Image (tube, rainbow, N blue to C red):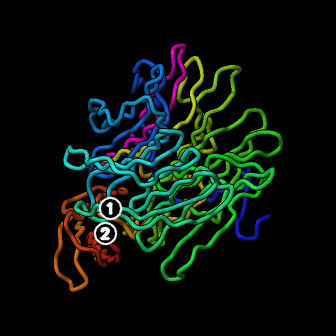
């Protein structure tokens, strides 16, 4: 066993009895078409952010024409926006929010004159910026990923990263940095990235093995640090899902399984126990909950993947996990004839509502479409058996994410009806804003804070409910 990681089988997790707020998917996922353009529609990328519209990018190929589209998909679907249409091959679109708090960035790869280049555009206030080139004249195809502050890519086995713009008026970027110089593919940028720190997870091919590696940078140390995350010899497709949970394919006991991080912790990896069918291209959904210790606990709620459970019919499957069910429960999400692959989980949040969306590629006789299934993610206060700390009193938990960029969520619990105040102050004790004031029934609550034009720094979250009062520090980094 890797000395740096504790692996556990999914079947042997012990449970203890607790009191906590239970989040559930209200109703089963119902499949509906999202994109039905002629040709092949594939290579999905989704960008979501609390309080802002959510967007999806994809590539359409019709005959010899490649077209890159971006479309708003939540809260109300918008018309597809055509970004580029060409006979040049287009692949691998990626999206992420802009570091200054609104708008999105878009990257994609283009082949021209027997070379590849990595393109960039940003979208702000309903206007697309001029197209720019991040990397050019590369011999092999580019596999790229976008973070809030950086873009990473691999080409010819090399892994690069570059820090991009930090303000809407900035049009320059730093010199690309070579991170790893052999056998690198499929990079993904980890959660809570900032200008001072980053984690990049990627495939590392060495002879007949493909391991999952993590390269970490922290300004304090001033150097890249490398760690191997996978134990098994063959691993593919590392991806981070909503909440920051990592998952990837693992070939073990002659079948493809899923390795994933419990509670978003890369040092605590679990392997699924499937024995009859393959689990491929996984993604995991985790969500923060409050605990008696007044820390935020990230709970694992849903694992999705495509599976060959039926002959010549790959389905999008999911595993619901406690406390949603008393045991791990398998569900079929796509329920469509033909092959359904590459599931993508999106977390849509607006006000106090949360919707979980699963988006995937559906093959047809004439090409491929993009389908999705959504379900409200509601909370119920109750008693559940599962493996997490006990919580039953008043509590204000640490905001998540923290540190954060522009927006974060604050969760708290009250065991009886009380007048509740949630207020933000700076370190000088000066009032910043009132997030909530009103009477609430017993239960668990979560509210969003969009910081707007506030400067980076430490802020105080103060909650008062009856005689209970607590304060948490949080760090805003822009």
**Image-based side of 447 in relation to 321, left or right:** left
- Given residues 179 and 377, the one toward you in this image is 179
In the displayed structure image, the side of residue 59 where residue 321 appears, left or right? right
Question: What residue is drawn where x is 19% and y is 63%?
Answer: 437
Residue 310 appears in the rendering: yes
Which x, y percent locates residue 175?
Answer: 44, 67
Q: Which residue is mark 1?
A: 99
What range is drawn magenta here?
352-377
Counting from the top left corner in percent of width and height, residue 361 is at 51, 29
Mark 2, Cα crowd under 10 Å, few <14 / some 14-19 / many 20+, is many
Observer-nearest residue: 107 or 100? 107
CB contact under 8 Å: marks 2 and 1: yes
Q: Earlier in the sequence, mark 2 or mark 1?
A: 1
Looking at the image, residue 310 lies above or below residue 231: above
The structure residue drawn at horizontal position 50% and vertical position 63%, both measured from the top left corner, is 297
Q: Which residue is mark 2?
A: 478
Q: Is residue 354 left or right of residue 59?
A: left
Classify the position of the N terminus by image quarter.
bottom right
| Element type where label 2 sits in the image | loop
How far is mark 2 from mark 1, CA to CA?
6 Å
């Amino acid at each position: 066993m890797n000395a740096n990681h504790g692996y556990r089988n999914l079947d042997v997790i012990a449970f203890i009895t607790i009191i906590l707020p239970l989040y559930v998917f209200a109703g089963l996922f119902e499949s509906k078409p999202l994109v039905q353009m002629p040709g092949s529609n594939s290579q999905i990328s989704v960008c979501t952010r609390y309080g802002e519209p959510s967007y999806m990018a994809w590539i359409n190929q019709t005959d010899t024409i490649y077209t890159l589209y971006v479309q708003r998909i939540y809260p109300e679907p918008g018309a597809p926006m055509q970004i580029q249409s060409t006979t040049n091959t287009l692949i691998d679109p990626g999206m992420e929010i802009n570091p200054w708090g609104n708008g999105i960035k878009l990257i994609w790869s283009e082949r021209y004159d027997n070379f590849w280049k990595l393109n960039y555009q940003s979208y702000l206030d309903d206007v697309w910026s001029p197209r720019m080139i991040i990397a050019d004249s590369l011999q092999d195809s580019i596999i790229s990923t976008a973070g809030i502050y950086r873009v990473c890519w691999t080409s010819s086995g090399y892994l690069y990263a570059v820090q991009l713009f930090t303000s809407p008026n900035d049009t320059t970027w730093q010199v690309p940095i070579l991170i790893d110089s052999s056998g690198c593919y499929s990079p993904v940028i980890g959660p809570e990235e900032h200008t001072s720190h980053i984690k990049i997870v990627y495939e590392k091919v060495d002879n007949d093995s493909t391991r999952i590696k993590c390269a970490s940078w922290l300004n304090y140390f001033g150097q890249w640090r490398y760690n191997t995350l996978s134990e098994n010899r063959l691993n593919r497709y590392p991806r981070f899902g909503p909440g920051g949970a990592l998952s990837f394919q693992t070939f073990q006991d002659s079948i493809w399984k899923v390795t994933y991080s419990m509670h978003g912790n890369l040092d605590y990896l679990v392997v699924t126990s499937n024995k009859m069918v393959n689990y491929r291209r996984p993604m995991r959904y985790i969500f923060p909950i409050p605990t008696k210790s007044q820390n935020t606990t990230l709970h694992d709620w849903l694992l999705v993947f495509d599976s060959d459970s039926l002959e010549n019919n790959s389905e999008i499957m999911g595993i619901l996990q406690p406390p949603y069910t008393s045991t791990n429960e398998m569900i079929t999400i796509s329920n469509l004839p033909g092959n359904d692959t590459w599931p993508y989980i999106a977390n849509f949040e607006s006000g106090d509502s949360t919707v979980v969306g699963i988006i995937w590629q559906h093959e047809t006789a004439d090409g491929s479409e993009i389908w999705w299934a959504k379900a409200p993610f509601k909370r119920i206060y109750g008693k559940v058996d599962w493996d997490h700390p006990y919580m039953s009193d008043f509590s204000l938990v640490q905001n998540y994410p923290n540190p954060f960029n522009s927006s974060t969520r604050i969760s708290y619990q009250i065991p009886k009806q009380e007048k509740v105040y949630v207020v933000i102050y700076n370190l000088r004790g000066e009032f910043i804003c009132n997030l909530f004031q009103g009477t609430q029934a017993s239960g668990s609550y979560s509210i969003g804070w969009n910081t707007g034009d506030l400067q980076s720094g430490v802020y105080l979250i103060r909650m008062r409910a009856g005689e209970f009062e607590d304060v948490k520090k949080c760090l805003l980094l822009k």
